[in-house]
Image (cartoon, helix red, strand yellow):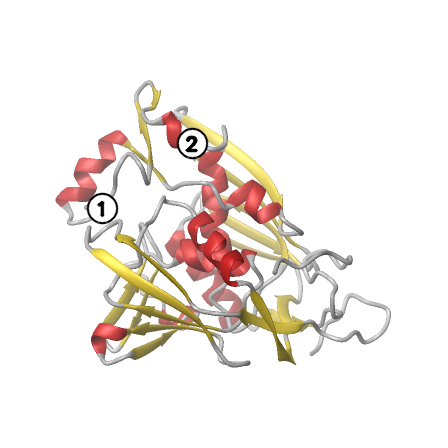
């Protein structure tokens, strides 16, 4: 079934990759090891592929059926043949926000660098390289009907839409409650979401490090919340940064399909594993339908926009 939101059959926009390769490096959040990542242009219809250069150039497609539920608690992890790529969500979010479809991502270890804890270093690298419009057309997914997915207090609702919009709420008791609504259009990803850094509570740091995690975390790449508020406010960009970072993660996690997913989302108390189980649910129940979108028309809102280059 082909679903269209337009009066007549439109022409789809072209697929996009980068004009040239970009290179980033830095400490990995959980392992604490230095990671090197090269993001290269890729042919049409090849999708997003991670390549473990230290494992015989094993390719791990960025697709939901490669997500490791066991290891996707504090970050999103892909697995193939016992080989992992961890903490991919900030890069995948930038890929979604920059409208990229085909990339080869070379990584020399099991985890991407955390950089500053947000998506902005990736987005800036993409802007520096520029986007290349490819010869084949791109299509998108939405849902065939309103879908609600719940696990206890965790909830995701999606309505069919030609727009990708997210209303997200978080609650950590009386200590932290925030909500934010975001629509992916024009330059809003960079201004509203891309700078939002990862965060944690001070009392959780020792627990994570005792479990062999967060070895690369620092006051420069994570906002730390103490009993009396944020300990390192100098790295904070938004007053409601915590929920905006949850949206950043969500945009990365829902990009793990073979084409971008659009719809009107409402999310409460989500997380990486929950996001991925939601995507798996949509696939298992055959709830996804393709959308065609006109050339030079935003698939997110159905209106002419300047697609970032």
Instruction: Describe residue 7's horizontal placement relative to residue 11 as left or right.
Output: right
Residue 244, given in percent of the width and then of the height, sits at 50, 40
Q: How many marks?
A: 2
Disc 2: which residue: 236
Residue located farthest toward the left when viewing the structure as drawn: 210
Residue 41 or residue 229, whichever sits in front: 41
Instruction: Describe residue 175's horizontal placement relative to residue 189 as left or right.
Output: left
Query: Does the rendering let one see residue 136?
Result: yes
**Which quadrant of the figure has residue 198?**
top left
Local SS, label 1: loop
Residue 136 or residue 163, whichever sits in front: 136
* Marks 1 and 2 close (CB-CB < 8 Å): no
Residue 69 or residue 37, whichever sits in front: 37
Residue located farthest toward the top when viewing the structure as drawn: 228
Residue at 86 percent of width and 69 percent of height = 7
Q: In the rendered view of the protein, which quadrant contains the N terminus? A: bottom right
Q: Residues within 10 Å of mark 1 (few under 14, many from 20)?
A: many
Local SS, label 2: loop
Point out the tag, 1 or 2, that comes first from the N-terminus: 1
Residue at 45 percent of width and 60 percent of height = 92
Disc 1: which residue: 216
Instruction: Describe residue 116's horizontal placement relative to residue 299 as left or right.
Output: left
Query: Does the rendering let one see residue 151?
Result: no
Residue at 57 percent of width and 66 percent of height = 131
Residue 114, given in percent of the width and then of the height, sits at 32, 50
Residue 52, given in percent of the width and then of the height, sits at 28, 73
Label 1 – label 2 distance at C-alpha: 19 Å
């Amino acid at each position: 079934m082909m679903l269209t939101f337009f009066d007549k059959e439109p022409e789809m926009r072209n697929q996009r990759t980068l004009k040239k390769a970009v290179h980033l490096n830095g400490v990995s959040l959980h392992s604490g090891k230095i990671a090197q990542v090269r993001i290269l242009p890729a042919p049409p219809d090849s999708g997003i592929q991670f390549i473990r250069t230290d494992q015989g150039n094993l390719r791990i497609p960025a697709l939901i059926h490669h997500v490791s539920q066991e290891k996707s608690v504090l970050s999103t992890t892909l697995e193939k043949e016992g080989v992992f790529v961890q903490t991919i969500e900030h890069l995948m979010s930038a890929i979604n926000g920059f409208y990229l479809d085909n990339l080869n991502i070379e990584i020399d270890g099991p985890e991407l660098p955390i950089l500053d804890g947000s998506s902005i270093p990736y987005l800036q690298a993409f802007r520096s390289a520029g986007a290349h419009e490819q010869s084949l057309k791109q299509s998108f997914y939405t849902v065939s009907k309103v879908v609600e997915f719940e696990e206890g207090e965790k909830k995701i609702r999606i309505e069919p839409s030609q727009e990708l919009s997210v209303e997200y709420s978080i609650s950590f008791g009386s200590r932290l409650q925030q909500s934010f609504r975001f629509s992916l259009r024009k330059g809003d990803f960079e201004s509203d979401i891309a700078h939002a850094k990862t965060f944690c509570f001070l009392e959780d740091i020792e627990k994570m490090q005792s479990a062999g995690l967060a070895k690369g975390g620092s006051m420069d790449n994570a906002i730390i919340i103490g009993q009396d508020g944020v300990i390192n406010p100098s790295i904070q960009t938004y007053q409601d940064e915590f929920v905006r970072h949850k949206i950043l993660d969500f945009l990365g996690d829902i990009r793990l399909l073979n084409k971008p997913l659009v719809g009107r989302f409402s999310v409460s108390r989500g997380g990486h594993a929950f996001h991925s189980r939601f995507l798996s649910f949509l696939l298992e129940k055959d709830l996804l339908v393709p959308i065609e979108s006109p050339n030079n028309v935003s698939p997110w809102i159905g209106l002419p926009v300047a697609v970032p280059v």
